[in-house]
Amino acid sequence: MYSVRMRAEKDGLHLSGAEGIFGAKDVQGAASAMVERAMRLKTRPGGIYLSIEPIPLKPKMISALPVSTVKSASVADARSAAEVFLKDAGISSRAIRAALAAIRPPAMRGAALLCAETGRRLDTSKKRGVRASVFGITPGAQKTLQKKLAGCGITHRRAFEAMLLAAKVASCPFILAEFCVSDDPEYATGYVSSRKNGYVRIENLKPKKSPEGGRAFFLEKDAPVEAVIDYLEREPVIISRAGRMRGEICPL
Ligand code: WAQ
Ligand code: MG
């Protein structure tokens, strides 16, 4: 098995990325699709960096999270909904405030690791943040998940890819929850995910056209920070089953 990753940039600014884990026979097709995707961006990339690395360990197999959507009409409602699900996953008000501060521009490339109790930033990679990486989905699970999502009207590739990342993050035993807002000014749907409540999409989580965005991973108290970072950045994880579709939910 190989981890195939692509990153496109222009003048040092990140434009787009993609990744997956593939068997030998699918590596070439996957790499070529990623390069094609980079070359089709609205902005012509300066550099496209492709890496193909063998995966040393037997990958861990996990399920995708169940998916639900909160159709909030305003940013204020969306933020309250996010708060409800974060609190339910054991995140303190202080830590929620710290996460909201972490999504202000300029966006980091990775996520802030925050203590779920105190809100203290636990990683020392200030500008970069911690990157969840080396994850993929089996062709069978991908087909099932995409079909189920399409049945709920969720067709954006962004949503599908975020679900894979969120599944890996939620599979880390010391992480209680994740909070995500896209840094794309055109994409205002974000999510709160946790083992407790699955992947909860929240519409209008930021104002239209806003450049803010980011991610926070909340760690339980006294979690082994270095081991968590190592798991997120390096441990191969493959999603081998789609999750349930729970449809629209209303938290308030
Ligand atoms: N690991 C950790 N953090 C990351 C990673 C990564 N691999 N990639 C991006 N981030 C952080 C970084 O701070 C970005 O600014 C922020 O997340 C947002 O990244 O179901 O597209 O790629 O419809 O803009 C949510 C989909 C889409 C909701 C999220 O994030 C839905 C998205 P983006
Ligand atoms: Mg982005």
Image: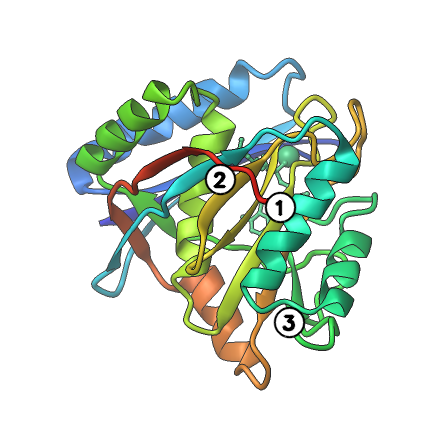
Mark 2, residues whose alpha carbon is within 10 Å: few (<14), some, or many (≥20)? some
Q: Amino acid at mark 1?
A: Cys
For label 3, the residue is 116
Q: Earlier in the sequence, mark 3 or mark 1?
A: 3
Q: Earlier in the sequence, mark 1 or mark 2?
A: 2
Find out if the beta carbon at label 2 lies less than 8 Å from the nearest ligand 1 atom.
yes
Q: Is residue 119 above or below residue 141?
A: below
Residue 237 or residue 150, whichever sits in front = 150
Residue at 40% from the left image edge and 55% from the top image edge: 168
Looking at the rendering, which quadrant does residue 142 occupy?
A: top left
Q: Nearer the viewer, mark 3 or mark 1?
A: 3
Where residue 81 sits in the image (x, y, percent)?
65, 45
Residue 49 visible in the current orientation: no
- Numbered mark located on residue 162 in the image: 2
Q: Is residue 188 above or below residue 76?
A: above
The answer to whether the residues at label 1 and label 2 have Cβ atoms under 8 Å apart is yes
Q: Marks 3/2: CA distance? A: 21 Å
Q: Nearer the viewer, mark 3 or mark 2?
A: 3
